[in-house]
Image (cartoon, helix red, strand yellow):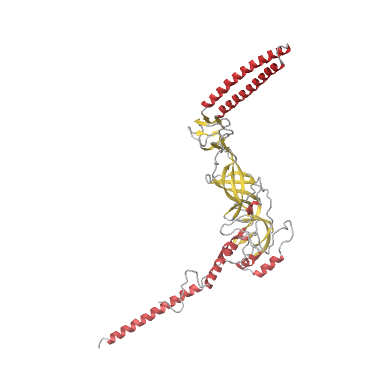
Amino acid sequence: MMNFPTTRVWSANQERRFVKRSYVFALGAMGLLAACSEPEVQQAPIGEVAVERRDIIVDAQATGAVEPIEIVEVKSQASGLVLQMPVETGSNVQPGDLIVQIDTRDLKNQLDQAAADLRSSEASLEVAKAQKERSDELYKARIITAQENEQANLAFTQAQANVIRVRTSVNIAQQRLDEARVTAPVAGTVIAKTVALGQVIQSATSVMGGGTTIVTMADLSRVQMRAFMNETDIGKISAGQNARVVVDAFPDRAFNGSVEKIEPQAVIQQSVTMFPVIISLPNNERLLLPGMNGEVSVNVESRLNVLTVPNDAVRNMRDAGAAAQMLGMDPEEVMATLRGGAPRGGENAQASDTSTGRAVPMGADSAARVAAGAPGAAAGAPSAAGGRPTGGAARPGGAAPRAGAGVASRRNPTPARQGVVFVVKDSGVYEPRMVRLGVSDYDYSEVVSGLQEGEMVASLAMAALQAAREQRNARFGQMGGVPGLTKTTPAGGGGR
């Protein structure tokens, strides 16, 4: 009985501590929920880039393999045992150098026999000639009949024919003896050897199947690369254009060549239509070997020292309103200004329709729109995944042009197109302006009209990426959270 007061006091203290701890936990949970429900949004910085002059070089790129221009299969016109073969794979030979020496014992015997027959026939011819002359004299003296004279003349004619026939046999035997010595028909390098010393080879002229191939050789002083170009780039490639080849064996060295021809038959590779393009390459140092893999870049278009603007600062008409919001401007006012101030006519009246935005460089914001699923991405522009822009792959705008690079010959010159930029004013205000653009690569576009050198334009790359992130997060929030991280409650009540 004396323990009840102590027990009652202890229970009250425990209750007060429990209530206090619960209150603190509730305040902490409320603060955490408030922080999660109202995240702090920081506006991405707006970059400013200058309009300046630089080189724009657009290349069409493809992969290919090095091939000899002409391959020669060396065969023998004589059959027999290989006695000598001084060449090996990789040997450089000149016309007339020995490739294979075949056993000539049988051939020499045939030649000796033919020569003996020739001497016998020539002796018979001399006898027949003397008999003919005597027969002619006796016939004139009317000692023999005409028939006997005719037989003597016939014997002389037959002896002449026999000499010619035997002499031909001697020439054939001599030719076969000479053919036993196989020499290089042209200058080149032995790239394959299929015959060894002591092997019996078959003649290429007297055996079905073409005979035995002794060696395969090619002139490697000039080689070619067969590259498969996408059909979207073929219309801008023609014979004579400059090409640049980098092989895997020499990644730090470029080999300059030219387009030799475009083969007319297309090749389908993984449901993509490709056309073989032959690139001719000088190879005086013999560094390029058949079978080497590499990448070829064909100079499609070149613009040297032209006024350029970064692609991140260019928008099409559909993206102009979203860009205006990023800059804190009224989208409707910006669109009205652009529609009223769009350039008309001029030297490039063939520009594309600004309402579609086709072929306008997309930049980072439209790439982010594509990633987020938002509309307004420009068609035919480089993507964030590294896609190729319209007109083929391109070098960075600030790279120095390679030797001999100039305005490349083109079948279809790139037409001018219209874009929207936001020019930075002194007071920090942005002025929307319609510009006319020309050739474009991954980073820069040529300015045909609408901008002056030294003007500053707004670059919305970071702001566009942040906007795309916010759109994606908002979409996930509407769906109930990030897929895969949301805990769902089974139908019918709580879990166990």
190, 141: nearer the viewer: 141
Residue 140 position, x and y percent, is: 73, 12
Q: Is residue 429 visible?
A: no
**Outermost residue, bottom direction?**
1
Q: Is residue 12 visible?
A: yes
The residue sitting at 34% across, 81% down in the picture is: 14
**Outermost residue, right direction?**
345
Residue 329 position, x and y percent, is: 63, 68
Q: Picture quarter containing residue 190?
A: top right
443, 193: nearer the viewer: 193
**Outermost residue, left direction?**
2
Q: Using the image, determine if residue 411 lies above or below residue 481.
A: above
Q: Using the image, determine if residue 288 lies above or below residue 146.
A: below
Residue 158 position, x and y percent, is: 65, 21
Q: Picture quarter containing residue 420?
A: bottom right
Q: Using the image, determine if residue 125 lies above or below residue 339.
A: above
The N terminus - image quarter: bottom left
Total marks placed = 0
22, 248: nearer the viewer: 248
262, 258: nearer the viewer: 262
The C terminus - image quarter: bottom left
Q: Using the image, determine if residue 84 lies above or below residue 295.
A: above
| Left or right for 35, reference 462 | left
Residue 106 position, x and y percent, is: 52, 26
The residue sitting at 34% across, 84% down in the picture is: 12
